[in-house]
């Protein structure tokens, strides 16, 4: 699919999908706890841009924390409910992650994107725009599922073998498929670790299927890390784990394989 056609199709989906809007509308403050903990740990008071803010709930909550918050989303439909909650330190508007033309260079202390980057077809453009609008010594935070993590197919295998249950995933639907996914992901991780430049590989999104089916980029910590280092940023944090003690230990030892990306970088 051509990039223009893909962007048009995705834009139409996020502006018309009642199912997706319904899912976002059910979010509560507890859904943002891990994300906000990163902001609390690495952020500082000042001007904050949240890209892909959905209904605007997270931006609204961040404004309550004292940030001068601007939340943007590609979907006017998502923003309509909380648009009337705007206040002097909260502005919600329609915007494109790949073209932040309305913002000047070096205009934000903190730029955040929570569970959005995997839905962006032109990843490098979005990262370039984030890098442009954040100030010197400012922070960029990007969270996302790690779609190259071997942990999700391993969990699928364990659930299927020992409990006879499984989770719906766009990447495999059998024990054999999950085992093959583990192998392919480990090979991809090794290749990326030894490559010089990031490679933002795309996939065909599947709309209205739930979960990560609509993801267009095979999001992973290695590509993000390589990009930000190439741009001269200091990497402060890579990932986190929602698993048990053993998984958390593995993530601590091999952070780029974690199931959840929690990339925090500082602009020098």
Image (tube, rainbow, N blue to C red):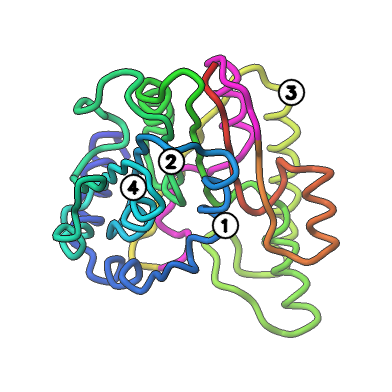
Question: CA–CA distance between discs 1 and 3?
Answer: 30 Å
Which quadrant would the N terminus be assigned to in this image? top left
Residue at mark 2:
112
Question: CA–CA distance between discs 4 and 1?
Answer: 17 Å
Identify the mark nearer the N-term, 1 or 3.
Answer: 1
Residue at mark 1:
34
Disc 1, SS: helix
Task: Give me the residue at 41% from left, 35% from top.
Answer: 111
Identify the mark nearer the N-term, 4 or 1.
Answer: 1
Please state which of residues 206 and 110 is positioned toward the viewer in this rendering.
110
Task: Give me the residue at 69% from left, 69% from top.
Answer: 156
Q: Is residue 178 magenta?
A: no
Identify the mark nearer the N-term, 2 or 4.
Answer: 4
Disc 2, SS: strand
- The image's mark for residue 194 is 3
Question: CA–CA distance between discs 2 and 4?
Answer: 9 Å
Q: Is residue 219 magenta?
A: yes
Task: Give coordinates of residue 15: x percent, y percent.
Answer: 19, 56
Residue at mark 4:
52
Q: Cβ–Cβ below 8 Å for labels 2 and 1?
A: no
Residues packed near mark 4 inside 10 Å, few (<14), some (14 to 19) or many (20 plus) = many
Task: Give coordinates of residue 10: x percent, y percent.
Answer: 27, 49
Residues packed near mark 3 inside 10 Å, few (<14), some (14 to 19) or many (20 plus) = few
Question: CA–CA distance between discs 3 and 4?
Answer: 31 Å
């Amino acid at each position: 699919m051509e990039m223009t056609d893909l962007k048009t199709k995705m834009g139409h989906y996020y502006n018309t999908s009642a199912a997706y809007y319904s899912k976002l509308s059910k979010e509560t403050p507890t859904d943002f706890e891990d994300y906000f903990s990163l902001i609390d740990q690495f952020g500082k008071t000042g001007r904050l841009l949240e890209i892909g803010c959905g209904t605007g709930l997270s931006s609204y909550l961040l404004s309550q924390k004292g940030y001068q918050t601007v939340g943007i989303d590609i979907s006017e439909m998502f923003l309509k409910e909380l648009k009337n909650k705007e206040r002097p330190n909260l502005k919600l508007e329609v915007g494109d992650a790949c073209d932040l033309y309305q913002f000047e260079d070096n205009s934000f202390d903190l730029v955040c994107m929570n569970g959005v980057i995997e839905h962006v077809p032109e990843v490098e453009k979005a990262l370039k725009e984030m890098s442009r609008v954040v100030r010197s010594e400012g922070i960029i935070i990007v969270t996302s599922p790690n779609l190259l993590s071997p942990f999700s197919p391993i969990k699928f295998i364990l659930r299927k073998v020992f409990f006879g249950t499984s989770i719906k995933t766009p990447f495999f639907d059998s024990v054999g498929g999950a085992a093959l996914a583990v192998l392919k992901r480990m090979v991809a991780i090794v290749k990326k670790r030894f490559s010089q430049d990031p490679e933002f590989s795309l996939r065909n999104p599947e709309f209205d299927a739930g979960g990560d089916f609509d993801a267009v980029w095979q999001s992973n910590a290695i590509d993000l890390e390589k990009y930000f280092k190439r741009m001269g940023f200091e990497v402060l944090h890579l990932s986190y784990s929602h698993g048990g003690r053993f998984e958390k230990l593995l993530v601590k030892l091999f952070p780029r394989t974690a199931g959840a990306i929690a990339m925090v970088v500082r602009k020098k």
